[in-house]
Image (cartoon, rainbow, N blue to C red):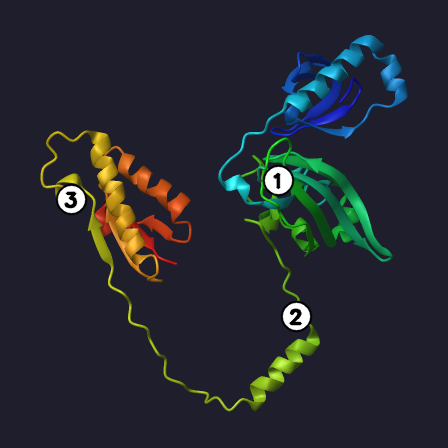
Amino acid sequence: MKIGDKVRFLNTTGGGVVRGFQGKDIVLVEDEEGFDIPVLIRETVLIEPANDMQVRQSTKSSQQTFVQQTSTIKQEEEYKPEETKEGELLTVNLAYLPVDIKSLSSTNFECYLINDSNYYLSYNYMGRAEAGWVSRATGVIEPNTKLFLEEFEKTELNDIEKVCLQFFAYKKGKPYSLKNTYSVELRIDTVKFYKLHSFKENDYFEDDAMLYSIVRRDLAEKELIISPEEIASAMQEKEVSQRPRIQPIAKKEKSPIIEIDLHADELIDNTLGLSSSDILEYQINKFKEIMDENKRNKGQKIVFIHGKGDGILKNAILKELSSKYKSAYYQDASFREYGYGATMVTIK
């Protein structure tokens, strides 16, 4: 990034022209009204680099520009992304947002790449043309970031009806688990760009967006395509089938719901001399014991009664479920029977 570049703000609307830098991580952006706005460099996206004439007309000396560029490079070298436990599994999305959602019939659209993982991704974003694939954006996206790829007009929707994202993942300066290389093709429903309800609230943008999942927890999304020949074959097999039209329904017996009361006075005969942390540890160990006993009983429902209280026990249980028992589904138990003080777990 250098003086004269046009940038767009990531986390809010607006943007402008780079007029200077403050320290290693602040860029001064002049908006349409002529105000210089200090913004974190990592919260801006370059949309149009400065041409040579703009650079010559800049009031900053070439020496100062060199120092600023050197500072930016040093900052990138010192950047150490924060890692999360969930980020060890790749989650990658494409996002499409209208520039002006109030003028959906005429507005341009933006495309972003979302990297919700601890890995750097070297990517190639392509669109399908008559003669073959055409690269629309290439580069590297940092861990746990979203990256502006392009802005396009509504007349270009046919060019993104079929897209493909290829990438490979790696970390810098540290050991990491080897990941597959990915090549995921998507069919974009361009009709949705004309419908307001297609753009929905999401975890990545303050504005409503249309998200397409590319990879979820290391697993690539696969497009379900059924050929006419497969449909005809399936219909023919159905016609010649000897299976009777009317069949009895074999109902499986439902396992009774297990209720576990985790209140201290139900688990421990005498709490005298035990600290709060000791009691909490005993309650969590009881929770783990019940979960381990039933982890192979698919469909089993278990209600853990923890009480409303200050929420410490409930939060500890939810933390265990999200980290050690990820295959289990959990929700608040029946309010009519337990109030706010119980969580129901279903073994999957």
Residue placed at 51% from the left, 91% from the top? 242
Position of residue 131 relative to residue 319, above or below, is below
User: In terms of secondary structure, where does tag 1 sit?
Assistant: strand
* Amino acid type, residue under disc 1 in the picture: Asn
Q: Image point 88% across, 14% down: which residue?
A: 56
Q: Which residue is mark 3?
A: 267
Residue under circle 2? 226
Tell me which numbered mark, 2 or 3, is placed earlier along the sequence: 2
Distance in Å between CA atoms under marks 2 and 3: 56 Å
**Contact between labelled residues 1 and 2, with CB atoms less than 8 Å apart:** no
Report helix, strand or loop for mark 2: loop
- Determine the secondary structure under disc 3: helix
Task: For label 1, count other residues whose C-alpha is less than 10 Å away and answer few (under 14), some (14-19) or many (20+).
Answer: many
Quarter of the picture holding the C terminus: bottom left
Q: Amino acid at mark 2?
A: Ile
* 60 sits left or right of 26 in the view: right
Q: Which residue corresponds to mark 1? A: 115
